[in-house]
């Protein structure tokens, strides 16, 4: 397969990636040549576009040959095989790296200007370049996306060597490549037009993509940082309400997590696409988290969830909306504990990898429809959920996700959690009349 230019390659790649449409995506293009390709992919998937800043470390006397790459966040990938084959000294490597680090910083300011990076945390990052040669730059880009909090990484390129998976060493969760030729010398040989991309073209792609995505998202949707009042404390949160939201789901995170939990944010993105709002908030203050006893104080956490729900119901934007709860790990125990309160009135509860056993004797008092989601490869928690389900008297269901461990890190498992939660809330949450 030969591509006329990068735009054509991006359109073909976007068509191949159609299966990702509707997921919570961010498309990350590698400057400079990967950005026009990524812009076409982002347009095809209705996803936001950002740059993934990476600089190849070229061999001093053969700069087209990459001996490694560097990226944002101090990420550094070195190809030891190339170093051994070329005899590049540590001093030469350090000089090249220092020079490229300066270029990296300058380009970040040039491409983004005053705009902040697109939020990647908890989302699927689709890393796009115009092709892969040695794999060092692609590996660094995937690691950068991971460092920015991406829940899943898909590397998508028009062309690459046949041993692409080996070259990446597992840094990407999924690989999508249109062509893997036997005879591969350089990426440019597979393009009729492979002219160098100017910085101005990169900034134009980013500006146009941002304008398109803002227009597609609609001006009426709300997505803002909030301060949740819970008794005598104030807790950070993020409230997202799509246009014409049919309900809003309050998240109770598990031990050691926060409102920035990548997994909860991934699920929240799926709920937004289904027309459901979300409130992600910190159950504890920073000072309280320092005491590990608070992390497992289910009564305290349940009280915070109830207070946050009361705060939400007083918010003008959420007036009249049904409220559901999504809990993970100990947060699920807090949600079930709180759901036993007669005044709580959640429309539905979903537990992901939860510890319902920690809700103890309160389980039979839960009246809200409850969905328990557990990984099939999480036997201890699965047994705890089966025991807890037997004590529930409300409408309930236990869903086991095959092959999933406690954190649902396996490919496709968190997507399944999102689908199950979305359908459960959609079936049980109608606009409230209070």
Image: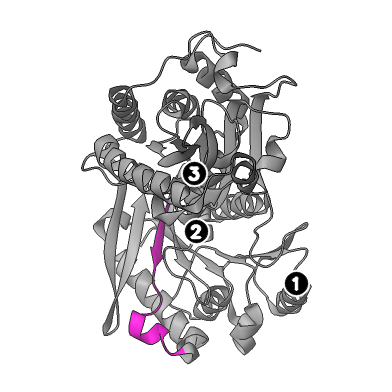
Which of these two is toward me, 153 or 279?
153
* Extent of the magenta region: 274-291
Residue nearer the viewer, 176 or 295: 176
Percent position of residue 387, x then y: 75, 79
- The label number, if any, that marks residue 69 in the structure image: 3
Give the mark, 3 or 1, whose residue is nearer the N terminus: 3
Image coordinates for residue 27, horizontal then vertical, percent = 46, 36
Mark closer to the observer (3, 1): 3
| SS at circle 1 | helix
Along the viewing direction, whichever of 367 and 98 lies nearer the viewer: 98
Q: Earlier in the sequence, mark 3 or mark 2?
A: 3
Quarter holding residue 290: bottom left
On the rendered image, what quadrant is the C terminus found in? bottom left
* Residue wearing tag 1: 382
Read off the residue under disc 2: 262
Residue at position x 52%, y 78% in the image: 334
Looking at the rendered image, the quarter that the N terminus falls into is: top right
**Residue ID at (48%, 14%):** 194
* Secondary element at image label 3: strand
Which one is earlier in the sequence, the residue at label 1 or at label 2? 2
**Dot 2, how many residues are within 10 Å of its Cα: few (below 14), some (14-19), or many (20+)?**
many
Quote the CA–CA distance across marks 3 and 2.
26 Å
Task: Look at the numbered disc 2 and give the secondary structure of its residue.
Answer: helix
Left or right: where does residue 379 sit relative to residue 73? right
Disc 1 or disc 2, which is closer to the eye? 2
| Residue at 36%, 30% in the rendered image | 216
Residue 365 located left or right of residue 287: right
């Amino acid at each position: 397969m030969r591509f006329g230019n990068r735009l054509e390659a991006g359109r073909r790649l976007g068509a191949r990636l159609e299966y990702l449409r509707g997921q919570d995506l961010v498309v990350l293009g590698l400057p400079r040549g990967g950005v026009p390709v990524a812009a076409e992919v982002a347009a095809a998937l209705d996803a936001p576009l950002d740059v993934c800043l990476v600089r190849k470390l070229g061999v001093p006397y053969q700069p087209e040959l990459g001996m490694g790459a560097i990226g944002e966040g101090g990420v550094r990938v070195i190809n030891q095989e190339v170093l051994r084959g070329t005899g590049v000294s540590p001093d030469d490597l350090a000089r090249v790296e220092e020079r490229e680090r300066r270029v990296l910083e300058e380009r970040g300011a040039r491409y983004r200007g005053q705009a902040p990076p697109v939020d990647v945390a908890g989302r699927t990052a689709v890393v796009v370049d115009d092709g892969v040669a040695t794999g060092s730059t692609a590996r660094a880009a995937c690691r950068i996306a991971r460092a920015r909090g991406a829940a899943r990484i898909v590397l998508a390129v028009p062309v690459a060597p046949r041993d692409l998976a080996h070259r990446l060493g597992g840094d990407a969760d999924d690989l999508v490549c249109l062509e893997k030729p036997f005879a591969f010398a350089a990426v440019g040989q597979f393009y009729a037009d492979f002219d160098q991309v100017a910085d101005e073209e990169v900034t134009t792609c980013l500006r146009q993509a941002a304008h398109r995505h803002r227009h597609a998202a609609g001006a009426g949707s709300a997505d803002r940082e909030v301060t949740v009042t819970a008794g005598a404390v104030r807790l950070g949160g993020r409230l997202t309400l799509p246009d014409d939201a049919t309900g809003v789901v309050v998240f109770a995170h598990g031990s050691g997590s926060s409102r920035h939990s990548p997994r909860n944010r991934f699920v929240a993105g799926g709920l937004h696409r289904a027309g459901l709002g979300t409130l992600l908030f910190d159950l504890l203050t920073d000072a309280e988290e320092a005491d590990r006893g608070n992390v497992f104080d289910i009564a305290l956490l349940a009280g915070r969830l109830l207070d946050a729900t009361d705060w939400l119901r007083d918010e003008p934007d959420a007036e009249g909306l049904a409220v559901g709860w999504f809990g993970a790990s100990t947060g699920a125990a807090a949600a079930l504990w709180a759901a036993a309160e007669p005044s709580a009135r959640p429309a539905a509860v979903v537990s992901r990898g939860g510890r319902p056993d920690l809700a103890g004797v309160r389980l039979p008092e839960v009246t809200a429809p409850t969905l328990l989601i557990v990984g099939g490869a999480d036997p201890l928690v699965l047994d705890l959920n089966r025991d807890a389900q037997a004590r529930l008297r409300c409408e309930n269901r236990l869903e086991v996700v095959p092959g999933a461990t406690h954190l649902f890190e396996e490919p496709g498992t968190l997507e399944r959690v999102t689908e199950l939660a979305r359908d459960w809330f959609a079936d049980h949450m109608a606009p409230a009349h209070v």
